[in-house]
Amino acid sequence: MGAHVSVASVIWHDLECGAYRADLPLWRELARSQGTGTILEIGAGTGRVTLDLARSAHAMIAVERDDELAAELTRRSRGLPVEVVCADACYFELEARVSLCIVAMQTVQLLADRPAFLRCAHASLTAGGVLALAVLGLDVQPFEVELDADVVEHRGVRYASAPTALRETGEQVALERRRTTFDGSAGSVSLDVTTLARLEPATLAAEGIAAGFAYRDLLSVPPSAEHVGSQVVLLEAIPR
Ligand SMILES: C[S@@+](CC[C@H](N)C(=O)[O-])C[C@H]1O[C@@H](n2cnc3c(N)ncnc32)[C@H](O)[C@@H]1O
């Protein structure tokens, strides 16, 4: 899979997100319990979740804003029941409704206009369809220390990404990573900062209810050695 990759954004995305597995059993079980309906994933990246479910014969629609990640997901999903839509999660429309919408890996905390996203998600779901949203778990604590780097080598270039800090500032949580590349003779170092909105499950549930959902459940994904845990808010679309 990685052998074809040449776009830096794809390499960094795979390195920083691609190896996470702890949440997959939860998405598989939700997909199984929803039956045969099409599943929508929001912010699908290069397809960690979408491809996993599509390989179990679930029909998938993957919305991803980044055109390079969307193109790579299109390439990786050849032969699988996956439709990739390159769009902003806050302003999208589907041709047919789906029965389950998955928002993994705290992606909902990246969205600039959550109420707009919730309206789009509601309009995309069948009556009784489920919206599942992962938010940062309770175990998350600020830190400022360089952790072990994830490393990959691609076409003679070594890419390393090490978390260096997690800062809570007012309404936001910022995860900082040091990214380094080295091709054997020269290297580069940069700081990547991912900023998430602070978001409690109860707040998200209340926003969902305002957008036409009913609260259904709160599940959790335990922390792993390398990743924080998450809480997963389940909402059910009520017909308007
Ligand atoms: C943390 S990654 C998660 C990727 C994938 N869902 C997974 O679990 O491995 C967040 C993804 O959401 C995408 N994203 C962020 N904001 C978005 C938006 N407004 N609309 C669509 N996608 C977005 C990013 O480009 C990135 O691919």
Image: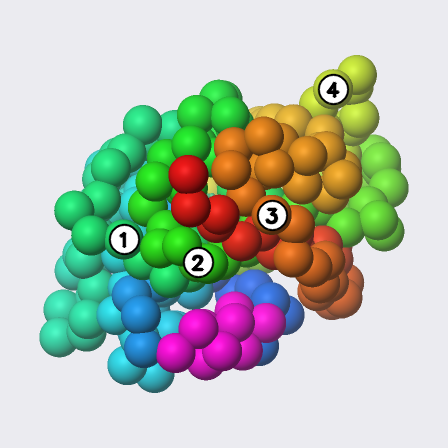
Taking the image as shown, residue 187 lies to the left or right of residue 50, namely right
Q: Is residue 235 visible?
A: yes
**Any mark on residue 129, and which?**
2
Residue lying furthest front: 240
Q: Position of residue 92 (x, y in %)?
A: 28, 34
Q: In the image, what residue type sits under mark 2?
A: Gly
Q: In the image, what residue type sits under mark 1?
A: Arg
- Label 2 residue near ligand 1, CB within 8 Å: no
Helix or strand or loop: what does disc 4 sit on?
loop
First in sequence: mark 4 or mark 1? 1
Helix or strand or loop: what does disc 2 sit on?
strand
Mark 4, residue position: 171
Residue lying furthest left: 79
**What is the CA distance from the residue labelled 3 to the residue labelled 4?**
25 Å
Q: Is residue 174 visible?
A: no
The residue under the point 20% across, 52% down is: 96
- Label 4 residue near ligand 1, CB within 8 Å: no
> Contact (CB < 8 A) between labels 3 and 4?
no
**What is the CA distance from the residue labelled 2 to the residue labelled 1?**
9 Å
**What is the CA distance from the residue labelled 3 to the residue labelled 2?**
10 Å
Examine the image and state in which quarter residue 187 appears: top left
First in sequence: mark 2 or mark 4? 2
**What is the CA distance from the residue labelled 4 to the residue labelled 1?**
33 Å
**Any mark on residue 97, and which?**
1
Q: Main secondary structure of the magenta part?
A: helix
What's drawn in magenta, residue-wise? 26-35
Of the pair 3 and 228, the residue shown nearer to us:
228
Relative to 59, say whether 147 is above or below: above
Taking the image as shown, residue 136 lies to the left or right of residue 185, namely right
> Contact (CB < 8 A) between labels 2 and 1?
yes
Q: In the image, what residue type sits under mark 4?
A: Glu
